[in-house]
Structure formats: structure tokens, C-alpha cells
Image (tube, grey):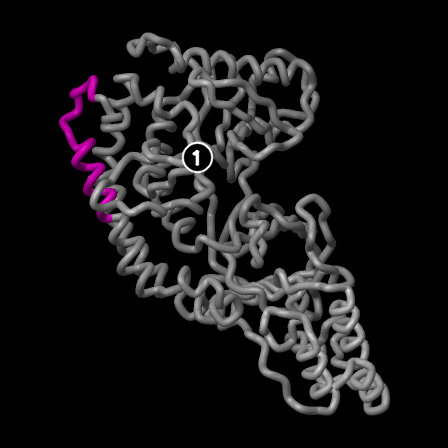
Amino acid sequence: MRIQTIISLCFFLLTSISIYGQAGLRPRGDVNCDWEVNIADVNSIIGSMLAGAEYHSFYTYAHDVNGDKEINIADANLLVKAILGQELPPMPSYSGTLPVLFINTDGHRNIVSKEEYLHADWWLDNMGIEGYESIGSPEEPLGMQIKGRGNYTWTLNKKPLRIKLDTKEKLLGMNKDRHFCLLASDFWTTSLGFELSRGIGLAYTPAVEPVEVVLNGQYIGMYLLTEKIRVDKHRVNINKQEDGETDPNLVTGGWLLEIDNHPDENQFGMFEGNGNWLAVKYHSPENLSPAQFDYIYNYIKNANQAIYTNNNSSVEWKDYIDMDSLACFYIVNEVADEIESFANSLFLHKQRGNNSKLIFGPVWDFGCSFGRQQTPSPCFIYQNTAENFKPHWLEKILQFPDFQLCVRSHWERFYADGLQSIEQYMDQWVERIAPALQSELARWPEFRYDHNIEYLHNHHYKPSLHNKIAWLQSQWGMPTGIDDTDWNE
């Protein structure tokens, strides 16, 4: 049937028939987001076809009515059937076994930018799950700002999101705040990495809870709702330094920094002693006075010089780096086999004061965890890495005997106490998210490998975790006091 015939038929039969109400999910085929399936939707699809549009993300999901990952005449045919009153294939929907976050952007506009916020209404339905509170309702929604986030993950079909609530809310038992992130993937590694961080006792680990999300009436899958890393008494608890500060005593802190290889306007860089480029992003404060810039630039430069000394017995580097936080941060990422941990998304913070030091953490990105086979040749995370994953500072600091002893001391404590409950945590996490993963898989079938629970749990993450822990114990499980071991052999 030709496109012109379809259009004429639709106009003749029904030009404005609504087959669904706005109370539920937006009906399949409601391409233009007016909560009706009618001729306007056919026109939108034909316009997309003539413009050569392609299915590429959940932002164009409504146009792909039949779910074949194309926008073509078959979608227009299904819309004609809907207008004639014939039932369309059902849209994937949430499982209802997790809380559901409903978000409607103004005008149902697509979220296409990581820089531009869109205003949206939202409410959270606890689905009757004990321990969680519903917030708002369809009749009385709350307001938020929403935009995209992420680097590599932003290029995928399923997009990560950043939200800023109009008012502070206690989401899913977390401390009241306005700033949260919706992570689109890495359900296993993120939750496991955060639990390891809590177990070893890092000062702050972002809270994380699984949630199902409906955006503009469409189910877009399961996400991890997590606290955004920022300066706050319930998050990175340091003095908040004002933008443009000039007082020499106040520019010493607090600082929230991130070592990251992705270019950013709030970033400075220098060469490490090994010749690698070190890029440092400043999150707080954001707009620096010359005094602030000079202070933090020189602090990082001096720390860098102290680390890359030719004297491995030097202790000058400890004037700049908090050794205990670095040791714990390193152990967590070594257990998780997170090969990117010292290359990207490496957060640091510094309290106010001339004698304060750089503290490592919080942990954040575990997207590359357990990416390498741990048998038959396990290795440390700084070994056999790709060029873009080369760790900053770590290899050189590991040559200092004091740091080797510090790592072994924290490992002995963590191995005896902090790792005992991790397998139980994994089992409970699997049981908790398993039903929602089935709905997620129906929505995003391309992730079927990542969501195969039996394989991931019994043949991938759990064996990898056991193997890595056992191997690390063979390397580090020595009586405290043994030094000058070459960790690079």
C-alpha cells in the first residue's frame, strides 16, 4: 500500500480517535505524545521516513511501533490498524517488583543533551514494596530538571540521566537531597563495587537503589538511582569553598577533584613523571579565582613531583597524599578488578587547611570490572592494561615500602572482616532485581548477555571475585612487616 493511500485512508476513517486514556502508560503508536493514536502519528512517522530517520535510542522508540529497530512503512501500517480499532502488540512494561519513577518532560520533549536541562514532572510509586515511600502522584507530581550524563555510556541506545529535583527529597531511603543520577547499566559491578567500598570503610560511598523508569509514558528499563558525588554533609563532607575565593587560608579547601581523561572546560593538566598526561577536573569550587587556580595547580604539581622521586625511601609524597584512603581505595578496585579506576572517574577531595591532604574517593565507575579472565593468569589492575587505561600515580606509589605495608595492613583487616558477607550480598541482590531484569530484557533485548542471571552470577562475577580474592591473598597475605617486595613481578 502506498504512503499516499495510507494517509487518505486515515483521514477518511478517523482523524482524531483516542483509544487510550492518559491515566496509564502512553499507548503504543502515540508517536507525537498527545496521548492519542491518530492521523497525526502517521504523519510524524512518514515525516521521519522521508527525512531518513533511524531508530537509535529510547528517544525515538515510539516511532518504531513494531519494534524491528527500523522506522518504515510497517510502522505506518500498524498505526492504521490502531486507528481502525485493531489491537497493537503490547509495549514492554515495568515488572512492578521495584519502585517505579515516572518522569514527564515539558511537552514530552526528548532528552538529547548532557548540557541543557529540561523541566519535567515526576512522582515515585513504591509499588507497595515495604521499606520505600511513594512521593507525589499523577494528580500531584513534583518538579525536576533532567538531562543526559556519562561519556561512553551516553553513546549507547539506553542513556544514563542526571536529575536535579526542585525540592530536596528522601528518595528510596537516601538522605534528603536534590541531586541524583540514573545509571543505565552495570547493575552488577556498580552495586558490588559500592558494597566493597562500604565494607572496607571508605569515608563516603554513594547510596544506590534499583528502580524502574517510565519516561514520557514509555517504559525505558531498570536503572540504578544513585547519589551524585558532591560536597555536602551527607556526601563528601568537607568545607564548601565558594567560587572566586581569594583568601589564602580559604583556598586550601575544600576541593572536590576528579582525574579523568575526557576533556572538560573545568580542567587543568600536566605531565606526570612517567610522561603520561594528567588531567584534573575541579567539581567544587567550579569557577576559580587566580588564587584558587594557582593553589590547586601547584598542589597537584608538587604532589606529582614528590611521587616521581628517584628515592623509593622518600616519604615526602605522604605530605600530599592520605595514604590510608589511597590504600583502601586501591584494594576495593583491585578486588573488583576495575582496570579503569586510576585512569578515569578517579575522585579526590581535600579538606581546608595547609596540613590537609588529598583523600582518595568516593568510588564511582565500575563499568570495566571483571572484564578480564582471572585464570589462569591473574594480575594486578595496573598490569597488562590498554593505553587509555594506564593508571595515574599508582605504579610509582606502589614502589614505596610504606605504602606496601599500609596496603597489607588494610588487606589483612578487610580479608578477615569486610569480605565475609559479600557473597551473601550478591545473592540477595540477584534475588531482588531478577524479575525486573526480565522486563529490562524485553525492553532492551540487545543486552541479553548482560542480563543472563545464571551465567553472570554463577559463571562470571562470582567465580571472578573468588579467584581474584584468593590470588590477592596469595600476594598480600603475609605477616605485617615484610617489605621491599617488588609488586611488579
Whether residue 376 can be seen here: yes
Task: Check the image and report above or below for 81 versus 68.
Answer: below
Residue 138 placement (x, y as % from top left)? 68, 69
In the shown orientation, is residue 194 left or right of residue 377? right
In the shown orientation, is residue 4 left or right of residue 482? right
In the shown orientation, is residue 153 left or right of residue 478? right
Query: Which range of residues does the magenta coloring cover?
Result: 466-485
Residue 337 placement (x, y as % from top left)? 33, 41
| Displayed quadrant of residue 60 | bottom right
Whether residue 134 can be seen here: no
- The residue shown at (57%, 63%) is 213
Identify the residue under disc 1. Answer: 389
**Which three-letter amino acid code belongs to the residue tagged 1?**
Phe
- The residue shown at (47%, 48%) is 207
Assign the C terminus to one quadrant of the image: top left
- The residue shown at (74%, 76%) is 35
